[in-house]
């Protein structure tokens, strides 16, 4: 019965993925078009609409210098304004955007905002953003490997996800799984990488321990479980079933079962 439910779910996801794929432009062209749209929106849209774009930029791992330059310019022009909650929210997201770049050239800007803004909320976001800089820089170093995959014909988004999944770092792998979940047209080979990570975890002492491993390890594997159903492939059922049946972590059991459609 479980396999039947999982199969039905996979078929439904495959249908949706196929329809989405048919509606997409080629991935390389689409990414360039999206970045152009981001830049245009940052320059012309109202603050509420720019917040939507800023949120997407934070999670997109783009390298468009023109976009980050525009964000820095607007942040420096607006970090003293505290009377408009929407605008203040926008400035806070801009801090996260600059930190997501992992580019040290923006560190002084965030330090300036954290030091000089009269807005407690913005000051807090600027400080938190500075704390993520080191991680983002390391992540972007791994993302540089994505360029090699792009040369092999893999679309930029899938190449970035692959680089994170192959990094061997749990935090980066977790980011890769999150990116995969948000992706509409990811390369299907990425799901094999996810299963490989889960299988190595199953074979490790952590899987057999009473806690299922560290909090980070369990959380990362939970995101891996969440990513697999979108593959629309029943071949991952056995891996998920083993985790749901044998894991000592209640959290991991839960996400494996949800992935199975239980």
Image: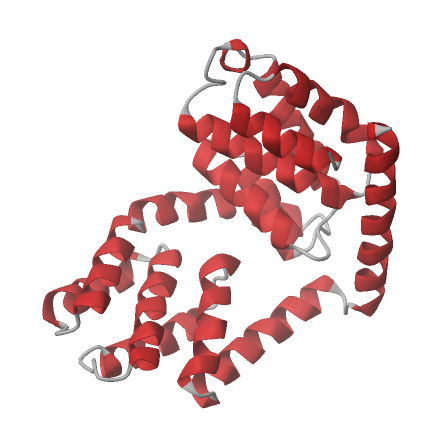
In the displayed structure image, the side of residue 200 where residue 76 appears, left or right: left
Residue at 52% across, 76% down: 38
Vertically, is 165 above or below 11?
above
Vertically, is 63 above or below 7?
below
In the displayed structure image, the side of residue 136 where residue 4 appears, left or right: right
Displayed quadrant of residue 77? bottom left
Vertically, is 69 above or below 129?
below
Residue 176 pos. (x, y %): 55, 43
Q: Tell me, what colour scheme is on the image?
A: secondary structure
Q: In which quadrant is the C terminus drawn? A: top right
Which of these two is toward me, 92 or 21? 92
Which of these two is toward me, 164 or 125? 125
Residue 62 pos. (x, y %): 50, 61
In the displayed structure image, the side of residue 79 where residue 218 appears, left or right: right
In the displayed structure image, the side of residue 102 where residue 78 appears, left or right: left
Vertically, is 220 above or below 44?
above
Q: Can I make out residue 145 in this image?
A: no
Residue at 48% across, 81% down: 49
Residue at 50% across, 44% down: 175
Residue at 56% across, 33% down: 222
Residue 14 pos. (x, y %): 84, 50
Q: Can I make out residue 237 in this image?
A: yes
Displayed quadrant of residue 101? bottom left
Which of these two is toward me, 25 or 2? 2
Q: In which quadrant is the N terminus drawn? A: top right
Residue 241 pos. (x, y %): 73, 23
User: Count of labels shown?
Assistant: 0
């Amino acid at each position: 019965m479980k396999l039947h439910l999982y199969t039905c779910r996979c078929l439904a996801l495959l249908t949706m993925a196929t329809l989405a794929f048919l509606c997409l432009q080629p991935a390389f062209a689409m990414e360039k078009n999206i970045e152009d749209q981001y830049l245009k929106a940052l320059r012309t849209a109202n603050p509420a609409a720019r917040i939507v774009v800023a949120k997407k930029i934070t999670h997109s791992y783009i390298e468009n210098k023109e976009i980050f330059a525009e964000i820095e310019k607007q942040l420096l022009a607006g970090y003293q304004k505290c009377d408009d909650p929407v605008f203040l929210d926008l400035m806070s997201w801009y801090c996260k955007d600059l930190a997501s770049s992992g580019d040290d050239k923006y560190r002084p800007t965030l330090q300036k905002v954290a030091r000089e803004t009269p807005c407690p909320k913005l000051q807090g976001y600027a400080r938190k953003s500075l704390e993520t800089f080191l991680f983002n820089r390391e992540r972007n170093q791994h993302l540089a490997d994505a360029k090699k995959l792009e040369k092999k014909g893999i679309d930029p988004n899938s190449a970035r996800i692959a680089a994170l999944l192959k990094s061997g770092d749990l935090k980066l792998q977790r980011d890769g799984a999150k990116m995969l979940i948000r992706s509409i047209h990811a390369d299907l080979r990425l799901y094999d990488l996810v299963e490989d990570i889960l299988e190595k975890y199953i074979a490790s002492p952590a899987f057999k321990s009473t806690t299922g491993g560290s909090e980070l390890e369990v959380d990362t594997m939970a995101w891996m479980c969440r990513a697999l159903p979108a593959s629309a492939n029943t071949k991952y059922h056995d891996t998920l079933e083993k985790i749901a049946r044998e894991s000592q972590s209640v959290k991991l059991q839960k996400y494996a079962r949800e992935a199975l459609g239980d």
